[in-house]
């Protein structure tokens, strides 16, 4: 058996230097709201059977894990959980990671995070970095490689999450249909600066600097997957004294980031909730990054 958490979109997503050129990369925002649970029973057949049957990426992940670990090829994989689909919570990576670790657990063979990352990318083309736990890593989601390990968890922030398209149709985003974002030279230079800023924010636990990184990344993504009323949302961020705004760069959820330890955090949260509802964003939730 194994379980895998979800994330709440990204703090940073763009393109970053890796010899011999540039590669897409991201830093995810951990989220304790949902989990996927997997059980794997080996043997009894010469293939992997998955329940529910449409979880084909998880089945592929189990098959690849068995092959990678040079284990017998068959078994029954069962998945359960309540992760919303197509929102930006990383549901497919959660499925895949739970499947990988359930196979390892069945044979008492731990799967190292770097191995799980490579398997996950092969199973689903692009993966998030959930296999690294609460460590902040800049992850090449299509190569399955860590571009930089920042060495610590994110500074603790309180997140007021919300569905950022509820004023339109609230149907979510078809993440598989989204083409990879293409960034211009100016944006590429900004990503290099944001990487340095994030490194400092993590090292010094600077919540305000973390918020600035997330906000700029969100603004750049506006050209690729626009958030309705973004400027008015940023106005709420400023009005309530939040540190920034983050988003799922291929989903329809965002989060207003607040300093968890600020003495007025509860009042700021309440004011932000009301202002979001006034804009029509009624689907809301909360969590802190160190829950």
Image (spheres, rainbow, N blue to C red):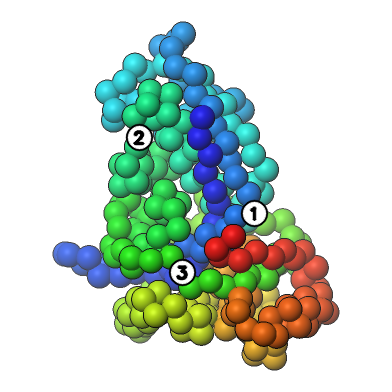
The residue beneath circle 2 is 110
Q: Residue furthest top?
A: 44
Mark 1 burial class by Cα count in 10 Å: few <14, some 14-19, many 20+: some
Contact, CB < 8 Å: mark 1 with mark 3?
A: no
Q: Quadrant of the C terminus?
A: bottom right
Front-most of residues 288 and 43: 288
Front-most of residues 205 and 165: 205
Q: Residue at x 38, y 55 (%)?
A: 141
The residue beneath circle 3 is 154
**Viewed as shown, does residue 12 lie left or right of 186?**
right
Q: Residue furthest left?
A: 20
The residue beneath circle 1 is 33
**Residue 106 drawn at (x, y percent):** 43, 24
Q: Is residue 141 visible?
A: yes
**Residue 14 drawn at (x, y percent):** 39, 70
Q: Residue at x 57, y 73 (%)?
A: 157
C-alpha span from label 2 to label 3: 26 Å
Q: Residue at x 36, y 42 (%)?
A: 116
What element does badge 2 sit on? loop
What element does badge 1 sit on? strand
Q: Earlier in the sequence, mark 2 or mark 3?
A: 2
Query: Viewer-nearest of labels 1 and 2?
Result: 2
The image quarter containing residue 81 is top right
Contact, CB < 8 Å: mark 1 with mark 2?
A: no
Q: Give the vertical position of 276 relative to 180 (above or below).
A: below
Mark 2 burial class by Cα count in 10 Å: few <14, some 14-19, many 20+: some
What element does badge 3 sit on? loop
Q: Earlier in the sequence, mark 1 or mark 2?
A: 1
**Residue 79 drawn at (x, y percent):** 58, 31
Q: Earlier in the sequence, mark 1 or mark 3?
A: 1
């Amino acid at each position: 058996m194994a379980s895998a958490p979800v994330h709440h979109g990204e703090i940073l997503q763009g393109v970053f230097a890796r010899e011999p050129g540039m590669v897409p990369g991201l830093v995810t925002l951990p989220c304790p709201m949902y989990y996927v649970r997997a059980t794997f029973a080996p043997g009894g057949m010469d293939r992997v059977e998955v329940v529910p049957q449409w979880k084909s990426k998880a089945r592929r992940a189990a098959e690849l894990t068995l092959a990678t670990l040079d284990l017998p090829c068959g078994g029954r994989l069962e998945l359960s959980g309540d992760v919303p689909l197509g929102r930006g919570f990383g549901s497919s990576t959660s499925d895949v990671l739970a499947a990988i670790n359930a196979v390892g657990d069945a044979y008492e063979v731990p799967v190292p995070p770097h191995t799980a990352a490579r398997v996950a990318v092969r199973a689903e083309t692009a993966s998030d970095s959930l296999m690294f736990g609460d460590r902040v890593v800049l992850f090449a989601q299509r190569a399955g490689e860590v571009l930089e390990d920042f060495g610590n968890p994110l500074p603790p922030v309180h997140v007021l999450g919300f569905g950022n398209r509820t004023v339109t149709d609230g149907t979510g985003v078809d993440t598989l249909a989204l083409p990879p974002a293409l960034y211009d030279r100016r944006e590429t230079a900004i990503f290099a600066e944001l990487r340095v800023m994030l490194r400092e924010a993590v090292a010094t636990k600077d919540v305000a600097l973390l918020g600035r990184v997330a906000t700029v990344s969100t603004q750049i993504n506006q050209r690729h997957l626009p958030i309705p009323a973004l400027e008015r949302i940023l106005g709420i961020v400023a009005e309530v004294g939040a540190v920034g705004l983050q988003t799922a760069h291929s989903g329809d959820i965002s989060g207003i980031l607040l300093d968890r330890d600020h003495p007025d955090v509860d009042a700021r949260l309440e004011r932000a909730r009301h202002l979001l509802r006034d804009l029509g964003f009624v689907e809301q939730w909360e969590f802190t990054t160190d829950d």
